[in-house]
Image (cartoon, helix red, strand yellow):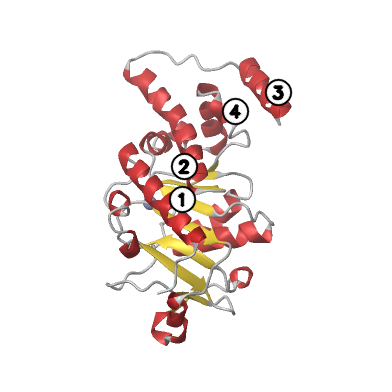
Amino acid sequence: MAERNIEIKRAIKEITETGKLLWQKGWAERNAGNISIRIEKYIHDNEEKNLKTKKTFYKLNNKLTNLSGKVFLVTATGSRMRDIGKNPDESILTIKISDKGDGYYILSNTKNKILPTSELIVHLLIHQELLKNKLHEIRAIAHTHPTELIALTHIKKYADEKNLNKLIKSIHPENTMFVNEGVGFIPFLLPGSYDIAEATVKSLQKHKLAVWEKHGCFAVGKTVSAAFDIVDMVNKSAKIFFLCKAARLKLQGLSEKQIQKLSVLMNNLH
Ligand SMILES: [Zn+2]
């Protein structure tokens, strides 16, 4: 069997390492969460033989012409983040979008039949939008369930993009410095639906992270690690918020002046 290409090997390592972190953080209960990475240079090997088998073609309801012929690694439906590292070949699939962009082929040769995550359409629509906007370097997408951030969206006041961002920035300086554009907020919609996919794509045009009310979030980055970092920084604010609340302490928060200074500092660094 031909040597698997280096980029795929690296991507599998990224997914397995981040999957483990998501589990350790408590953000990936059961089979929660999913990850995808666009592969830049796919070296044809034995997997490509599967293209000739009609069995492995899966039709999509959307035409993704911008993704024609593109190859992605995606986590499998039902796979557990904590277990990906134990058996990456049965937890991560290589898929290739058809030339017409109307479906995908599964290239992986797995022992058991596995299918991509149920959120595949959200991932693919985001990847398509990234390419349309020439954001070629952003290749990784992660969906996870950051506990404290979700908890915030259960509070009426913070189930609102403006209030949520104001709170996030007022608690942790990192969020002004590295997530200055803020996070998107999507009111509750059914997971896996076209509606949530469309809303997420729209939200990620302006943000690196979109929060799904009472569910979780989607983050994008150059690498899976970078997407994880965004979630980690944003969730930290939420965590500090609840720590103060649990101790019955009044949260002082950073002042607008302090936030402004952090913003200027960051702009000067760029
Ligand atoms: Zn989810």
Look at mark 4 in the image and give the residue it sits on: 176
- Neighbours of disc 2 within 10 Å: few (<14), some (14-19), many (20+): many
Residue type, mark 1 in image: Ala
Question: How crowded is the residue under tag 4: few (<14 C-alpha within 10 Å), some, or many (20+)?
Answer: many
Mark 4: is the Cβ under 8 angstroms from ligand 1?
no
Would you name the residue on which mark 1 appears?
A: 142
- Between discs 4 and 2, the one toward the N terminus: 4
Q: Is mark 1 on a helix, strand or loop?
A: strand
Which quadrant of the figure contains the C terminus?
top right
Which marked residue is nearer to the observer: mark 4 or mark 2?
Answer: 2
Q: Residue 264 carries which label?
A: 3
The residue carrying pointer 3 sits among few (fewer than 14), some (14 to 19) or many (20 or more) residues within 10 Å by Cα, namely few
Verify CB contact (< 8 Å) between mark 1 and mark 4: no
Q: Are marks 4 and 2 in contact (CB under 8 Å)?
A: no
Kindly identify the amino acid type of the residue bearing the numbered disc 2: Phe
- Of 246 and 114, the residue lying toward us: 114
- The x, y position of residue 74, in whole percent, is 43, 61
Alpha-carbon span between mark 3 and mark 4: 10 Å
Q: Where is residue 143 in the image (x, y as percent from the top left)?
A: 43, 50
- Disc 2 to disc 1, how far (Cα)? 7 Å
Say if 180 sits above or below 22 in the image: above
